[in-house]
Amino acid sequence: MTRSYRREAWLMGVAIIGQHFMIVQAAGYPVTLGWWWACP
């Protein structure tokens, strides 16, 4: 149960971060800004 939950959370995090990087690159901002937004 715990293992599957961690796996789902990891997949969601990867999907969200991937989407954010795509949006940041499309907007023309540096990729480092994406890391700063992802880790407040």
Image (cartoon, rainbow, N blue to C red):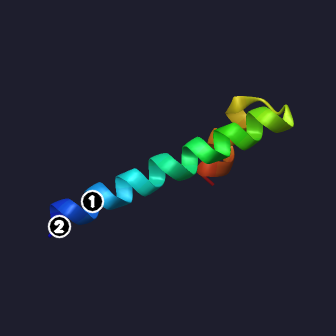
Residue ranking furthest to the bottom = 1
Query: Compared to 28, does 11 lie above or below?
Result: below
Q: In this view, does 19 lie to the left or right of 9?
A: right
Query: Compared to 14, does 2 lie above or below?
Result: below
Query: Compared to 18, does 9 lie above or below?
Result: below
Query: Compared to 14, does 6 lie above or below?
Result: below
Residue in the image at 55% along x and 52% along y: 16
* Residue 31 on image: x %, y %: 70, 31
Residue in the image at 68% along x and 49% along y: 37
Q: Quadrant of residue 12?
A: bottom left
The residue pinned by badge 2 equals 2
Which element carries disc 2, helix, strand or loop?
helix
Q: Residue 6 carries which label?
A: 1
Which residue is more in the foreground, 36 or 34?
34
Q: Quadrant of residue 5?
A: bottom left
Three-letter code, disc 1? Arg
* Residue 36 on image: x %, y %: 67, 44
